[in-house]
Amino acid sequence: MTNRLMFVAIRALGLALLVSINGLAQDRSGIGKEIEALREQLKQKENEFLAPSAEDRARFAELLRQPDTGLARLMPRELYREKLSVREGGAYYSFTRLSNSYDSDPQIGFEQGTLHTGFAGANFGFLVELGDIPIEEVDIDHPAVRYLAAFAAPTIEPDAREQQRKTGNGFTIADRTYRSSKTASVGSTYVLRSVSYDSSDVLVAFCVVRQDTDGSLILLWKKLKQFPIPHLARQ
């Protein structure tokens, strides 16, 4: 082969390789866009899956017209943690950020038939069960709520850790038990005080209005009081 013919052949091969590489890059770019589109579709479908039903919203429409109220679904963590892309499988909920993601300041969780609160660092919370009373009748003047409404969040870490221990073990005031976990009972109303340092401090009443066929709980809730965001002096 002459030098000219060899040059032409090499040039043709180089052009072919360049076209192939460009095509591969375009294919990868297209696949990347498809992945992003599928992620958005999955997020939308999961939001629909986690949302309470239209029947639930209609049933409690009167209360839901009031400010600082809502409906939430808690999935059983042991069944859905690995099935959904939302962190921890929709088993958590934030009453301040209106999100089921564990990454969004969760204040209540559901696992193995138990409601629980206080999840990271020095954060902690109290739950008290009021029983079968309408959520509309619960306010900060309710005898079982007064302690939670008057409680001052600790501002130094040893005190916060001690409060964690105390709520984990549970304690009783005026025949009411306050604890960081309670058995979930359909039809029962609860009050929660959740303290999340540098994020939120909130007092919420909620009722477990039903349990769905997939094991998830539907909570009807109303916010009783929002406290200033607590901060902790680390020691």
Image: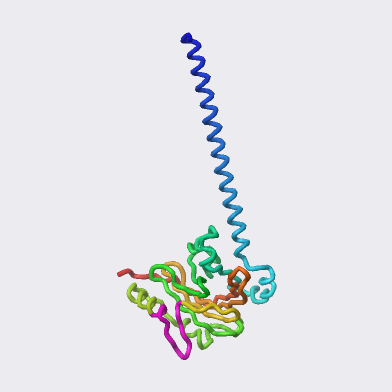
Q: Position of residue 178 (x, y in %)?
A: 46, 82
Which scheme is used to colour this image of the protein? Answer: rainbow
> Which residue is the extreme one toward the bottom?
174
Q: Position of residue 220 (x, y in %)?
A: 60, 75
In this orientation, which residue lies closer to the viewer: 79 or 18?
79
Quadrant for the C terminus, please.
bottom left
In this orientation, which residue lies closer to the viewer: 90 or 225?
90
Identify which residue is drawn at 34% across, 73% down.
156
Which image quadrant for residue 167? Answer: bottom left
Tell me where the magenta segment starts and ends, as one range: 166-180
Q: In the displayed structure, would residue 82 be above or below residue 233?
A: above
Q: Is residue 114 left or right of residue 165?
A: right
Q: In the displayed structure, would residue 36 be above or below residue 171?
A: above
Q: Is residue 206 magenta?
A: no
Q: Position of residue 124 (x, y in %)?
A: 42, 74
> Which residue is the extreme one toward the top?
2
Q: Position of residue 189 (x, y in %)?
A: 57, 81
Identify which residue is drawn at 54% across, 64% down.
80
